[in-house]
Amino acid sequence: MEATMLTAGTHVQSISLPHQVIRGPNSLTQLFGFLPKNISRVFIVGGHTALSIALPTIEAVVTNNYLLESAHYGGEVTRTNLAQLKQQASRFDADIIVAIGGGKALDMGKWLADELGLASVTVPTIAATCAATSTVSVIYDEAGHFESLISVNKAPIAVFLDSDIIARAPYQWLAAGLGDTLAKLYEFRAIAENLPQCSFNSSAYMNGKLCYDIIVEFGEQAISDVQQGRTSPALEAVMDAIILYAGFTSIMGVGDHVAAAHALYDGFTTNEKTRLYGHGLLVGFGNLVLQVLEGRSDLELEEAIKIARRCAVPTDLDEIANLTQAELKSICQAAVATPDMNNMPMDVSVEQLMAAVNQVSMFSKSVR
């Protein structure tokens, strides 16, 4: 991002950052040492797999000072599931919400805490998004299609990054995190001229650049380590990038920092063949499409493809799903209609987006 003249602020901005980050092997065993002293009734929300992984550790270290209740988050971040969880947490008279799992479970936990006026703690069991630290939750409709984003009032009071847990997750989730986090630089760079010029956005950009640099250096090794089920300095470095620094980019930034990569993801959620492929993997492919829309050179695109491949991110539409051109057109129609696409510095038509997707896929086949 080139140096530019700063513009005066026109309103007061409030940001909320996680109070504490507890990271490293077996860090989840420290959970109760970081809860506020007035907390006794802990309501735990998560996915089935995440709860099966984390609850034994939590139950092994809990003391008589606490009462626990756990609930499945519902499988999708919807208003219906939120209403059910609110009833359950209210009946339990919860003091705090602990959200455990992937991005959707964490988003649900943050949203639930916000609705109830409670503090939240997040425990990511996969390093797939920055949901554990961000103050945004992604909402879906009952069919699982993207609906909207909401901002919660407060960031989690604690984020537990247990590298032992994350190292045991399927490597595809880490790949998704790498793809999603690369967008922090790629998308910001594409729309920087349209964003307010202020120090918060300078911070957001620098965090995005830091994420990119860490992923380029350590992403491939981290994927290899997770494939072996082992924690490592490389894994912990990319965990920091995916969960912390990317989250700080989201929190610190002024204005909407997403663009065509996330717009294409939104479009993918409307097709049953691609909807469940993985947010970050689809965004990671979208990063490449974005660069074609920007008119970047073949050399830049080739480098981005090589980085994506080292991080196990798809670089060819055929790796995601076997789509007809009619299905791709429907996806692109949904994508160009999203607010995310409106952030692009130029108008993007359905035809241009389809052409960019096909160009990336064709060009990728020639990259060795």
Image (cartoon, grey):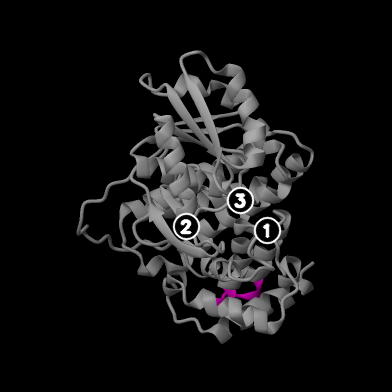
Residue 292 highlighted magenta (yes or no): yes
Residue 256 lies, in percent from the top left, at 39, 62
Identify which residue is drawn at 62% across, 35% down: 51
Tag 2, which secondary structure?
Answer: strand
Spot occupied by residue 296 in the image (x, y as percentages of width and height): 57, 74
In the image: residue 227, left or right of residue 6: right
Please give the name of the residue rendered at 55% of the width and 53% of the height, measured from the top-left corner: 76
In the image shown, does 73 or 273 lie closer to the viewer? 73
Closer to the camera: disc 2 or disc 1? Answer: 2
Which quarter of the rendered picture does the C terminus lie within? bottom right
Q: Is residue 153 one of those drawn in magenta?
A: no
Mark drawn on residue 307:
1
Q: Is mark 3 on a helix, strand or loop?
A: helix
Q: Distance between the residues labelled 3 and 2?
A: 19 Å
Q: Which residue is drawn at 44% across and 36% down?
A: 89
The residue where tag 3 is placed is 177
Q: What residue type is labelled 2?
A: Ile
In this rendering, is residue 4 above or below 174?
A: below
- Magenta stretch: give its range: 291-299
Q: Magenta part mainly helix, strand or loop?
A: helix
Do tag 2 and tag 1 residues touch (Cβ < 8 Å)?
Answer: no
Query: What is the total number of numbered labels drawn onto the structure image?
Result: 3
Q: Mark 2 points at which residue?
A: 139
Q: Which amino acid does label 3 sit on?
A: Gly
Report the amino acid beneath label 1. Answer: Ile
> 363 or 351, which is in the foreground?
351
Distance (Cα) linking label 2 and label 1: 30 Å
